[in-house]
Image (spheres, grey):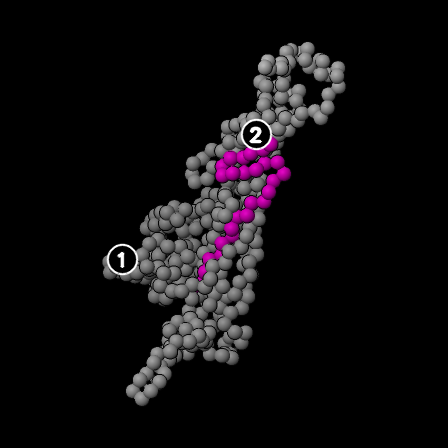
């Protein structure tokens, strides 16, 4: 998926003329005075709306690429300044100059905001992240057979809009929650002591308590809408990951939210990998004479099996292509395995026994000693 996005993005980036400054803001649906947080939030919503994997309308991929490029420009301080002051031509010249000089930016920068990694040392590799969040997603066997789209509302902690105004310099801070100070233990002897201090938010930076710019503290709750794409044939334990949408903290990148597939039990079918299993009870007369039976599959379609031979107890019949959709690009379906459980009568009358012997013939003989 990532390679597809990168390919589309690269093609459009090289072949589509830059838009005007006003158009970039309109693409994301924000004002020219929007904060970086507002731009990021708007980009996330727009990119989900036009993502090529979700939006199959004509022009969606191109729109996605334009939105991604607009986000790249508006979140890059130098590009945004050039774009706002000099417009399309100024930005073109700036990018051409950066290309000749081998400057940074590009795909790594824009996608690293959301946890994508195209190799190299991305932002997520250089910075600490907040903990990932694993959430069980309970789905039925029918949902895993057909695929499904589930809308959920997730509440996370996001940084105060003006959080940077609440930080002050403190060289004792070595990183988020880590403070190192020098302690004299004897004349001429100094020891370095590391201790926990939640006010330290980044190397050399400390949070200012009771800061007026963030009266409610470093973070505040935010509700975000997530669209979970349950793909056909997903396995229990697989995860649908939303990168960079876990809690935010100063000096740290947001971790990931993982919705882990939990497969609920089914009344009739049992799943193992790509295959389905079912146990069917049949009367003795059907086991001896043959039978037909109609099944209803997980998606509601019906199919029939015909058995013409004698069926032994615990006999297993394989029905090709009636299992689960195969994952991993292999295509097709697994198989259905039917185990027959023959229901023998509890008792027989003497006349029934006589008739059975007459039909089947023979009988047991005592071994001669």
| Residue 203 in picture, x, y percent from top left | 37, 73
Circle 2: element type: strand
Name which quarter of the figure residue 112 lies in: bottom left
Looking at the image, residue 325 lies above or below residue 185 = above
Nearest-to-viewer mark from 2 and 1: 2
Query: Where the C terminus falls, by quadrant?
Result: top right
Span shown in magenta: 253-279
Dot 2 or dot 1, earlier in sequence: 1
| Residue 69 visible in the displayed image | no
Q: Is residue 333 left or right of residue 284?
A: left
To which residue does mark 1 refer? 99
Q: Nearer the viewer, residue 149 or 358?
A: 358
What label sits on residue 304 in the rendered view? Answer: none
Figure label count: 2
Front-most of residues 233 and 72:
233
Residue 270 position, x and y percent, is 57, 37
Residue 235 visible at all: yes
Q: Residue furthest left?
A: 100
Q: Is residue 272 magenta?
A: yes
Residue 369 belongs to the span the image colors magenta:
no
Residue 7 coordinates in the image, percent (x, y): 36, 47
């Amino acid at each position: 998926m990532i390679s597809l996005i990168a390919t589309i993005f690269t093609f459009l980036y090289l072949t589509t003329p830059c838009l005007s400054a006003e158009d970039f803001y309109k693409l994301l649906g924000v004002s020219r005075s929007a904060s970086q947080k507002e731009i990021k939030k708007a980009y996330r919503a727009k990119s989900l709306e036009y993502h090529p994997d979700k939006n199959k309308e004509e022009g969606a991929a191109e729109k996605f690429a334009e939105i991604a490029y607009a986000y790249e420009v508006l979140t890059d301080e130098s590009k945004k300044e050039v774009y706002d002051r000099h417009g399309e031509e100024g930005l073109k010249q700036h990018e051409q100059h950066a290309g000749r000089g081998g400057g940074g930016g590009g795909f790594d920068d824009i996608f690293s905001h959301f946890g994508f990694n195209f190799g190299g040392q991305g932002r997520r590799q250089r910075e600490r992240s907040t903990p990932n969040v694993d959430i069980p997603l309970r789905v039925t066997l029918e949902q895993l057979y057909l695929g499904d789209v589930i809308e959920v509302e997730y509440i996370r902690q996001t940084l105060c809009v003006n959080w940077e105004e609440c930080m002050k310099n403190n060289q004792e801070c070595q990183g988020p929650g880590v403070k190192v100070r020098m302690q004299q233990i004897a004349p001429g002897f100094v020891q370095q002591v590391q201790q926990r201090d939640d006010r330290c938010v980044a190397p050399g930076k400390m949070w200012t308590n009771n800061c007026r710019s963030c009266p409610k503290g470093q973070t505040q709750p935010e509700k975000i809408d997530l669209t979970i794409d349950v793909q056909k044939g997903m396995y229990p334990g697989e995860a649908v990951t939303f990168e960079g949408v876990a809690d935010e903290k100063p000096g740290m990148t947001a971790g990931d939210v993982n919705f882990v597939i939990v497969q609920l039990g089914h009344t009739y079918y049992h799943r193992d990998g790509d295959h389905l299993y079912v146990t069917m009870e049949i009367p003795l007369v059907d086991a001896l004479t043959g039978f037909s039976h109609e099944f209803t599959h997980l998606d509601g379609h019906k199919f029939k099996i015909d058995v013409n031979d004698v069926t032994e107890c615990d006999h297993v019949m394989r029905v090709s292509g009636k299992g689960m959709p195969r994952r991993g690009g292999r295509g097709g379906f697994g198989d259905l395995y039917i185990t027959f459980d023959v229901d023998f009568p509890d008792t027989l009358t003497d006349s029934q026994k006589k008739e059975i012997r007459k039909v089947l013939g023979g009988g047991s003989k005592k071994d001669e000693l």
